[in-house]
Image (cartoon, rainbow, N blue to C red):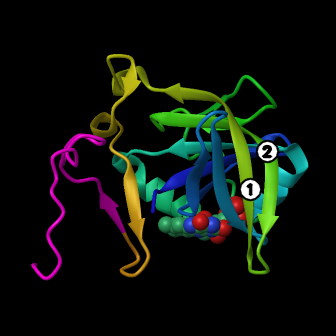
Amino acid sequence: MPVVVIGTMNEERPNYTTIALCGVVEVQPPMIQISLAKSRLSCKNIEDTGYFSVNVPSLDMLRGVDYMGIHSGKTTDKSELFRTFLGEKGNVPMIEEAPLNMECELVSKFEFGGAHIAFVGEVVQTYCSESCLVDGLPNIKKISPVTFSVYDNSYWSIGMHLGKAWNIGIKYTPPKEGTD
Ligand SMILES: Cc1cc2nc3c(=O)[nH]c(=O)nc-3n(C[C@H](O)[C@H](O)[C@H](O)COP(=O)(O)O)c2cc1C
């Protein structure tokens, strides 16, 4: 799963929380989903403000990122761990050191009878560090994102480039039935 940090505003104080339950649900308009346990301060902040940010940290931020996934803003001030900048809309806090930030406006939420609420936000603005752009586009190697694997409870970095999408399958011949 991807490791991202959710930024929310708790009254006037930014709160940052690490999550892995996150995914893109629409491209145009761009929509992103995050799932938060109801007990999280971030959950309350999103309900109160209608905004959140999704920050993609790089691996050099990892210890701080893990810290933000251990401690709740209910008891720990996490606003000074990294530098904050505010988005264009709604006073949405984002992490300066994170190479990619998405400013999101809440559009929907879903509950499935479990511990979590799935929030869907429209990405109203995206910010990328200049140093992580190649030909004007975010570059995955420069961003150096982190993934999370549930079963070994561990963080993993991305590996090597494997090929071009919508391309390496073009000349693929499916194996005939009965062969390996
Ligand atoms: C790697 C990792 C992934 C996590 N993923 C989620 C998640 O997807 N949803 C969630 O509600 N909590 C997740 N957590 C736990 C929260 O980050 C943690 O409970 C945090 O203290 C909540 O902070 P808050 O109360 O300030 O929002 C994760 C923690 C770690 C370390």
Q: Dot 1: what SS?
A: strand
Residue type at mark 2 is Leu
Tell me if residue 144 is in the magenta stretch. no
Verify CB contact (< 8 Å) between mark 2 and mark 1: yes
Q: In percent of the image, x 44 and y 76: which residue is there?
A: 150
| First along the sequence among labels 2 and 1 | 2
Coordinates of residue 156 in the picture (x, y in percent): 31, 62
Q: Would residue 14 appear left or right of 132 to someone viewing this image?
A: right
Determine which residue is flagged by label 2.
106
| Residue 121 in view, yes or no | yes
Q: Is mark 1 within 8 Å of ligand 1?
A: no
Q: Would residue 92 appear left or right of 176 to someone viewing this image?
A: right
In the picture, the disc for residue 55 is none
Q: In percent of the image, x 41 and y 65: which residue is there?
A: 148
Outermost residue to the top: 135
Closest to the observer, 55 or 95: 55
Coordinates of residue 166 in the picture (x, y in percent): 30, 41
